Image: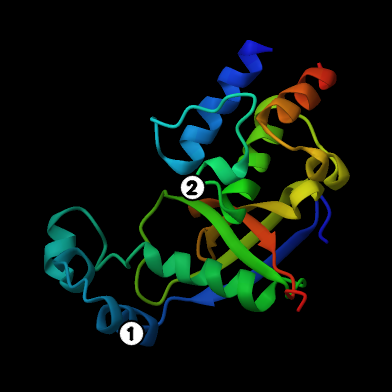
Amino acid sequence: MAEILETLNRIFQDVVDDKNIILKRETTAQDVDEWDSLNHITFIVAIEKHFKAKFTTAEIRSWKNVGDMCDSIARLA
Amino acid sequence: MANIGDKFAEHFVVSADIHEGFIAIFGDRHPLHTDARYAVARGFQSEVMHGNILNGFLSYFVGECFPDREVMILSQEIKYQRPVYLGDRLTLEVEVIDVHHSVNVIELACKFRNEIDSKIVASARINVGRTSVKET
């Protein structure tokens, strides 16, 4: 699970072009200024491409924080 | 929403109006783009057209030709592989190579071919998102 979080962190840093941002399981979009709607879309696309996975809209809407994203990705493995 | 494998094609001419309009708007008068002797001395046939003219064609395709009107370009990468000259006729070939239904994003692979020799002069990847009317 730590590996998934680390990967998400790296993908997110690339999306927002900021290497100083550190995502934690409890991080939400509201906690990060750069996590706006457009970056959110880019983030999800990058995650789907990296993990070669496709999520449903309902699944994405159910995510409350980064930890939920990690759990969804872990279930795909 | 488009499906993986959907293909489209559009034709463009790099006309003097487009070349001069690009220079008038953006001001890039580098001699490679405006001085034939300068360009020939560097191994080109004539003035090389600005690569970003092709970006304009891509914008036109997404905004005016793509069947889905609720679209916006989220990201774009382009590689310029061969020079384009004034008057060249180009075919833009576009294929939907991925669809991310979760966030309504499609990924397009684009190739510009010179119609004289069919060689690819540029290729691009574009992520296109869907817009939606905000509920009030």
Q: Residue, x 18% and y 73% (percent of image)?
A: B29
Residue assigned mark 2:
A34
Of helix, strand and loop, which one carries label 2? Answer: loop
Q: Quadrant of residue B42?
A: bottom left
The vertical placement of B109 against A68, above or below, is: below
At label 2, counting other C-alpha atoms closer than 10 Å, the crowd grade (few under 14, some 14-19, many 20 or more) is some
Q: Residue, x 62% and y 20% (percent of image)?
A: A5
Q: Which residue occupies the foreground of this view, B81 or B3?
A: B3
Of helix, strand and loop, which one carries label 1? Answer: helix
Q: Are marks 2 and 1 on the same chain?
A: no
Q: Position of residue B74 (x, y in %)?
A: 57, 57
Residue assigned mark 1:
B21
Q: Is residue A57 left or right of residue A6?
A: right
Q: Is residue B13 left or right of residue B106?
A: left
Q: Position of residue B28 (x, y in %)?
A: 21, 71
Quarter of the C terminus of chain A within the rendering? top right
Q: Is residue A15 left or right of residue B4?
A: left
Q: Amino acid at mark 2?
A: Glu
Q: Nearer the viewer, mark 2 or mark 1?
A: 2
Pointer 2 with pointer 1, Cβ within 8 A: no
Quarter of the N terminus of chain A within the rendering? top right
Q: Amino acid at mark 1?
A: Gly
Q: Residue, x 62% and y 12% (percent of image)?
A: A3
The image shows a total of numbered marks equal to 2
Q: Which chain hosts label 2?
A: A
Q: Position of residue B36 (x, y in %)?
A: 18, 70
Q: Is residue B26 left or right of residue B108?
A: left
At label 1, counting other C-alpha atoms closer than 10 Å, the crowd grade (few under 14, some 14-19, many 20 or more) is few
Q: Position of residue A13 (x, y in %)?
A: 47, 33
